[in-house]
Amino acid sequence: MVKPSAKAPPAGSKESHERLPAYLHIVRTISDRIASGVYGPGAKLPSEAQLCVEFAVSPMTVRRALVILADKGVVAAEQGRGTFVRSFDLSDSVFTLEQLTGEWLDGSTEVRLLSASTVKADEQLGAMLSVPVGRRLVYLRRLVVKDETPAVYHKEYVIFDLQRPLVESQLKLTSLHGLLQANRGHGFPGGEITLCALALEEEAASALDQPVGAPALCLEHLSRDSAGVPMSWGRFLLRYDLFRLRARLGRG
Amino acid sequence: MVKPSAKAPPAGSKESHERLPAYLHIVRTISDRIASGVYGPGAKLPSEAQLCVEFAVSPMTVRRALVILADKGVVAAEQGRGTFVRSFDLSDSVFTLEQLTGEWLDGSTEVRLLSASTVKADEQLGAMLSVPVGRRLVYLRRLVVKDETPAVYHKEYVIFDLQRPLVESQLKLTSLHGLLQANRGHGFPGGEITLCALALEEEAASALDQPVGAPALCLEHLSRDSAGVPMSWGRFLLRYDLFRLRARLGRG
DNA sequence: CAGTGGTCTAGACCACATG
DNA sequence: ATGTGGTCTAGACCACTGC
């Protein structure tokens, strides 16, 4: 029947504790079963058809739930064979930078512009930014201070381009959020970002009130415009005692 | 019409260059338009109904594509208003540990067990593992060597539990992959993992062939069983000059 | 109120895996 | 041949937004 009314009372079952959409209810229920061992690691889930019957929903709804679970890495679907419970690796860990803005970003966070000048690209910078040695670059140094404690040192080289008067707005960045936003290539692929550890050199060390050689997290970023041409390169140095990235498993 | 044949030649349109499913075709097309500026940052996408017409598919298919795009962080849907192009932050970066196993894990990688012993929990360990001071713990030290170069130092404390003869299998771990797999709580929430920078202390430094005080990436892990009870705590120390996490934006 | 996204149905056909 | 996941349809009702 299709014409009269493809209607269905959304909460057909008994427990509708929270007005949860059906597909999320299925996600949660299956997650719980995996967590509690009803479906152990490597086990095969009931087929989609069976789940349709059990949850009294249509195939698309079950499907949607399974896609979400697969997406979170909790299960893996194999065409023609079934859907299986996956077990986690440490290597499934996913680290996010939200933490650097989220909780951390409140009223007591302040961005200070330490210096702004122009420099000529040396060999190393030229290679990184794909410009000839001697090319004029804007050189910016910033310090993020929280509760009077220096926490992040940022240095950045921006290609000076008369066509693109980005520099002015870049200079004005005095909020951390703005700083992070500005460092996107607002084309699509955007750029590359890497994270590593390193030892602080004199300049950064003194800015961060740390001894020379102290460890730090280094967040390096290369922005490109929509054509893939480098626009800027820089690095954030994060005091090792103040920053710690927490992971969540899968994508939960 | 529903009875006769809810059939549709999958490639109704002209270009079927790759036999791409319709929903992926839509994802790609919209992504391209955003990348090339047809839909600029903050712009409103055509409504779902309009997209249905344009791509000649049913609402569910358009919906699916939009959910994927929203999921990747490329667009944001707002109920009752529309779907809008989002622009990336640096804080959208996502770091994965696959890199530590993927490329890096080949034949020349070897895991050496440096020592295995039992120790009594001191105050600090007791607190971390939620056990009383003096509790017996298994203490493991490992070194991952690649091409004769020490790269990762791993120390781990496992709660000694006669009920759970994990220890034996833990001892045998001599492959990196196995090591990473073993450090999962194979219950569901699994555990917590954090990433930070620190300075190497004497023991780790000598094992890694680095000077004391050299920076390192530290990957700390706390495993819990399915009931949430801690099972082990440990940390991987990664030589700063050998490891670098690359990010991808959104979830792409 | 009309427009928009959010959820859902009851099927269909296809591709793949297994016995 | 059977069972499984993968894709898709042509609608439906709901909740929310904005005029």
Image (tube, coloured by chain):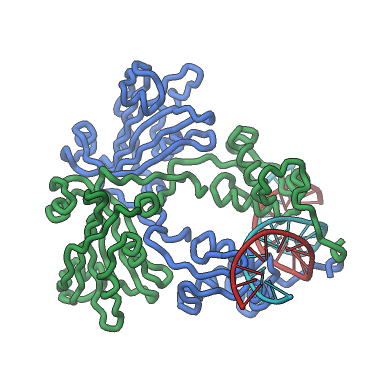
Chain colours: A blue, B green, C red, D cyan
Could you say where residue B55 lies in the image, as x and y percent from the top left? 74, 45
Note whether A229 is above or below A65 in the view shown.
above
Of residues B10 and B220, the one drawn nearer to the viewer in this rendering: B10
Number of numbered callouts drawn? 0
Of residues B173 and A245, the one drawn nearer to the viewer in this rendering: B173
As drawn, which residue projects farthest toward the bottom? B163
Could you say where residue B17 lies in the image, as x and y percent from the top left? 68, 42
Q: Residue at x 54, y 72 (%)?
A: A30
Q: Residue at x 32, y 19 (%)?
A: A119
- Horizontal side, residue A100 vs residue A114: left or right: right
- Horizontal side, residue D14 vs residue A44: left or right: right
Do we see residue A65 in this rendering?
no
Q: Residue at x 21, y 31 (%)?
A: A203
Of residues A101 and B45, the one drawn nearer to the viewer in this rendering: B45
Could you say where residue A166 lies in the image, as x and y percent from the top left? 47, 24
Displayed quadrant of residue A93: bottom left
Displayed quadrant of residue B113: bottom left
Do we see residue B191 in this rendering?
yes
Could you say where residue A19 lies in the image, as x and y percent from the top left? 61, 69
Displayed quadrant of residue D3: bottom right
- Horizontal side, residue A77 vs residue B117: left or right: right
Q: Looking at the figure, which quarter contains the N terminus of chain A?
A: bottom right
- Horizontal side, residue A202 vs residue A78: left or right: left
Q: Residue at x 16, y 40 (%)?
A: A211
